[in-house]
Amino acid sequence: MVFEVMKVPTTPFDGQKPGTSGLRKKVKVFVQPHYLQNFVQATFNALTPEKVKGATLVVSGDGRYFSKDAVQIIIKMSAANGVRRVWVGQNGLLSTPAVSALIRERVGADGSKATGAFILTASHNPGGPNEDFGIKYNMENGGPAPEALTDKIFENTKTIKEYLIADELQEVDISTIGVTNFSGPDGPFDVEVFNSASDYVKLMKSIFDFELIRKLLLSPKFTFCYDALHGVAGAYANRIFVEELGAQQSSLLNCTPKEDFGGGHPDPNLTYAKELVERMGLGKSNSGVEPPEFGAAADGDADRNMILGKRFFVTPSDSVAIIAANAVGAIPYFSSGLKGVARSMPTSAALDVVAKSLNLKFFEVPTGWKFFGNLMDAGQCSICGEESFGTGSDHIREKDGIWAVLAWLSILAYKNKDNLNGYKLVTVEDIVRQHWATYGRHYYTRYDYENVDAGGAKDLMANMVKRMSSLDEVNTIVKGARSDVSKVVNADEFEYKDPVDGSVSKHQGIRFLFEDGSRLVFRLSGTGSEGATIRLYIEQYEKDPSKIGRDSQEALAPLVEVALKLSKMQEFTGRSAPTVIT
């Protein structure tokens, strides 16, 4: 099948600078004439010729609405720009971590390796005709495009005059595994559709002891539940948890990927994963049915995770710290030791305490997985995490939701390996409480104020910057709100100098640090498609074993009161309560 290249005249578009999360807008924006095409061509133009001409690219995503159309458009544009071959997950489905793994691990039949990928996802944001779509580019290391490239892409979108497309190229059947061959001005062009799960499963089996996990899942005393929230994780769940590990089919919830995520919000937290939360005994209703011992959820593109025990929620901050504390013994991949650990700045300091105790290299980085990727590429970091339900390791260069679930199952299997037929298994709650007893507890919560007026959000942040200049004034407000809260001893805007490439990232969040080790952090998030999201992080460290068993929201209530008074949250946003509390 022969194709010709068309040069389509176009005009610059009102894009935004794509970050590590890519470009995210409402579907109605992406379906405008030339909008997606402009971004794709701007990306091709920003790449070096060897990353395009004769290259192999991955094109897939979380299956949200408009994905199948986008796959066909990008295939036609890849052909026109001289790409040699495109790899597509069956039905256009590949999780973000699976794409990273494919770039790093997969070798084609002719010895080819991918040099990059277009990932079609808006992550944890809703999908559907009236909801969100997104696209991002990942590099040859499997990680998100660095700022230098996203800057070039952004500049290109403002000056683009034409894009290349093989418009008459026959559409590829992405539902059927196989290779479709074409010929064009630059020679052969192939599209290979392959099983979405096989390569990723192979990688997971090289990291974890599947046989030991399988013994745990087959124990009559262990029950399991996994909720894919109708996201792309469903393409992996049956293969990994049922076929490979022996879980019951009934253990899987919402594991059929849907273009609109079943009308839900594919964000794995206590607010949006309602069905799993109820099943795990953490909801408001009481069905009288005994909850499973272990539960987990994924977001739309399966890079985020939530871990639950029976009637027990594990904070993401605790989760990464506990994985790091137990990795060497429980996970074969880490049997020779950890190179180092890292967390994002807003994440609680639970990981810091583990690193200090185990004498590990430790890094505090801005929010954004690219910072972890730099450390990993330099061989300085093995395990990392963000409080926004992202956890991962150096097996890829993205956070990995299913990896985190398998890590927890590995720890549970390791703790119970000599007790699978005993009276009582070691539970998720047991592991967390033992961790607190050993390392202390970091009471932690995050308040999200989503889709607030962008102007009000910026004014709030500007006011917080002003506040930092007078700690006396800050402490007057603190004591006026709650006399039982410690005084603020430092306030700053977090700034990070990358130890690998020397780059400096400024204005990464406003921090108020208290004398007793407590913290308040305020950030504007760029992960939404419209409006602004203000994230407020509240943390208090407790070493006294007699005080580590309190309800988190109760323990943090005084600090929350101070944070709302200090920030004038209601005055600036009009919100009397957050959209989500985690």
Image (cartoon, rainbow, N blue to C red):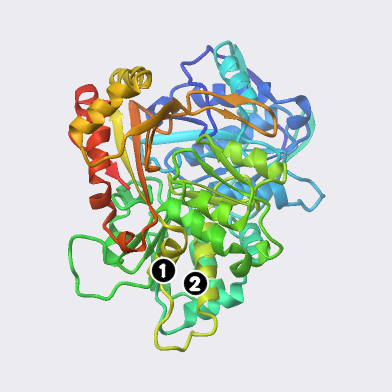
Mark 1 = which residue? 428
Q: Name the residue under label 2.
A: 412
Q: Where is 168 relative to 354, above or below?
A: above
Q: Which residue is rendered at x = 53% and y = 60% of the image? A: 323
Q: Can residue 495 be seen in this view?
A: yes
Q: Nearer the viewer, residue 44 or 317?
A: 317
* Amino acid type, residue under disc 1 in the picture: Val
Left/right of residue 78 with respect to residue 540 in the rendered view = right
Percent x, y of residue 59: 60, 41
Q: What residue type is labelled 2?
A: Leu
Up the image or down, 555 lies above or below 1; here it is below
The residue lying toward the viewer, choosing from 156 and 493, is 493
Which mark is first along the chain, 1 or 2? 2
Residue 155, position in %: x, y?
58, 15
Q: Whole-Å distance between the Cαs marked 2 and 1?
A: 7 Å
Residue 558: give x, y in percent of width and height: 23, 42
Mark 2 secondary-structure assignment: helix
Q: Residues within 10 Å of mark 1 (few under 14, many from 20)?
A: many
